[in-house]
Image (cartoon, coloured by chain):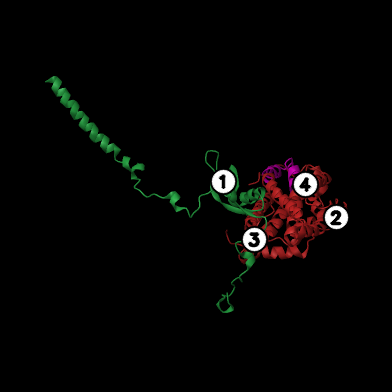
Chain colours: A red, B green
């Protein structure tokens, strides 16, 4: 359970915090669900179990964030997870894309895991105790997700042939979604000035690139460079999503909607 | 399998689903040590292309529930083992009951009987001296 939010928040800071925790929660839930779609389909049975285990970790992290939102008076975690329309979701577009092939799934997961680790590292010093405590715990699990995905990226690249071809083909679509992944939404300045996010986004992007580049190069992929930084007017952090999220939410919530009042 | 005997929904026989390992994969036996005070215990095996991968997938497959402080993976072909065909290796042709502890199970009663008899001998000596 997250620590109780005790400090008094000004309305502007509160709004920024709610928006940011939604980003964190929705990122984890959305990717966790996409991961779970590989159940029964992963390259081998060992990976099938491993990937599902990682999916469950991501969902567990989402629950932690939804409980923070519950503390902030934003509703029950089940409602937050299943009942919000796409316009109320704040996950990055990268994470709602359909899984594509294994190479895209792995590359997407790897770049996200590094981003998540960089973001969590900063959050261990957050002015919000619940975020700081949660980040320290999640980092311990995410380290192994990241190690797992990194081994896959290297293995696919070093295998050459079709594996390298598919990995190379995955770079462009993943990179196209990076600016949206790196966006902190309309309240980014408030997040930094209030210490909720005690690190400017640009520094996080640099730290991300430093960790991703050597792995890509070890896999035999040329470094595509960082995407240009531009102003955001739309995208996942601002509730503007792709049809992929609609489809994901319909599937994910189908059991919940059979009887929303059921106790599990 | 012929068309007439195939059940609805049954998976068509597929050579790729046979027991042949994927290229470069090997079987690794997995041992988990639940705590520093306990030995590593064999928990199962995984297919993996390298020891590093074996550890990765063993972590998620065998240590998700329950605690662990250490994990071993051992390439199955590196394990020296007795052949199943060599049944004589484990042959027990003669009665080996004398090696089993069951012979000691009534020790307490025997000891009691012996002590009872010993005391009676002492009683005899005592009687002799007194007499």
* Mark 3 belongs to chain: A
Q: Does residue A196 sit above or below B23 in this rendering?
A: above
Which residue is drawn at the image coordinates 43% and 51% (left, top)?
A: B88
Q: Nearer the viewer, residue B87 or A154?
A: B87
Q: CA distance from mark 3 to mark 4?
A: 40 Å
Place of residue A89 in the rendered image (x, y in percent of width and height, measured from the top left): 74, 58
Relative to B130, A11 lies left or right? right
The verdict on residue B28 being magenta is no
Q: CA distance from mark 3 to mark 2?
A: 35 Å
Q: Are marks 4 and 2 on the same chain?
A: yes
Q: Nearer the viewer, residue A149 or A208?
A: A149
* Residue B110 shows up from this direction: yes
Magenta stretch, residue numbers: A116-138
- What residue is shown with label 2? A232
Q: Return the mark for residue A2.
A: none
Of badges 4 and 1, the one in the foreground is 1
Relative to A244, B85 lies left or right? left
Q: CA distance from mark 3 to mark 1?
A: 25 Å
Of badges 3 and 2, the one in the foreground is 3
Place of residue A134 in the rendered image (x, y in percent of width and height, measured from the top left): 68, 45
What crowding class fits label 2: few (fewer than 14 Cα within 10 Å), some (14-19), or many (20 or more)? Answer: some
* Mark 4 belongs to chain: A
- What residue is shown with label 3? A39
* Mark 1 belongs to chain: B
Relative to B78, B87 lies left or right? left
- What residue is shown with label 1? B32
| Local secondary structure at mark 4 | helix
- What residue is shown with label 4? A13
């Amino acid at each position: 359970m997250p620590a109780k939010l005790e400090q008094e928040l000004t309305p502007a800071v509160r709004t920024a915090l709610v928006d940011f925790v939604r980003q964190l929660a929705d990122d984890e839930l959305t990717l966790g669900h996409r991961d779970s779609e590989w159940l029964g389909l992963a390259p081998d049975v060992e990976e099938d179990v491993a990937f599902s285990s990682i999916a469950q970790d991501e969902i567990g992290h989402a629950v932690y964030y939804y409980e923070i939102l519950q503390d902030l008076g934003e509703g029950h975690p089940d409602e937050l997870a299943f009942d919000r329309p796409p316009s109320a979701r704040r996950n990055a577009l990268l994470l709602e894309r359909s899984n594509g092939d294994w190479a895209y799934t792995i590359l997407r997961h790897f770049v996200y895991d590094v981003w998540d680790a960089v973001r969590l590292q900063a959050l261990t010093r957050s002015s919000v105790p619940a975020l700081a405590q949660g980040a320290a715990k999640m980092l311990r699990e995410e380290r192994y997700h990241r190690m797992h995905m990194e081994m896959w990226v290297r293995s696919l690249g070093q295998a050459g042939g079709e594996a390298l071809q598919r990995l190379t083909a995955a770079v462009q679509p993943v990179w196209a979604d990076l600016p949206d992944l790196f966006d902190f939404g309309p309240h980014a300045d408030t997040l930094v000035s209030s210490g909720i996010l005690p690190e400017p986004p640009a520094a996080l992007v640099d730290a991300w690139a430093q960790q991703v580049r050597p792995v890509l190069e070890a896999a035999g992929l040329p470094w595509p460079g960082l995407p240009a930084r531009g102003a955001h007017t739309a995208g996942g952090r601002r509730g503007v999503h792709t049809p992929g999220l609609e489809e994901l939410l319909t599937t994910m919530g189908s059991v919940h909607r059979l009887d929303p009042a059921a106790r599990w | 399998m012929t068309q007439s005997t195939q059940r609805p929904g049954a998976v068509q026989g597929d050579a790729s689903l046979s027991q042949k390992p994927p290229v470069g994969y090997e079987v690794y036996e997995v041992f988990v040590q639940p705590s520093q005070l306990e030995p590593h215990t064999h928990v199962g095996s995984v297919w993996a292309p390298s020891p590093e991968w074996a550890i990765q997938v063993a972590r998620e497959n065998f240590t998700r529930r329950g605690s662990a402080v250490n994990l071993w993976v051992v390439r199955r072909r590196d394990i020296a083992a007795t052949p199943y065909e060599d049944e004589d290796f484990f042959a027990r042709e003669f009665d080996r009951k004398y090696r089993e502890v069951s012979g000691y199970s009534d020790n307490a009663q025997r000891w009691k009987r012996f002590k009872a008899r010993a005391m009676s001998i002492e009683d005899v000596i005592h009687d002799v001296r007194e007499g």
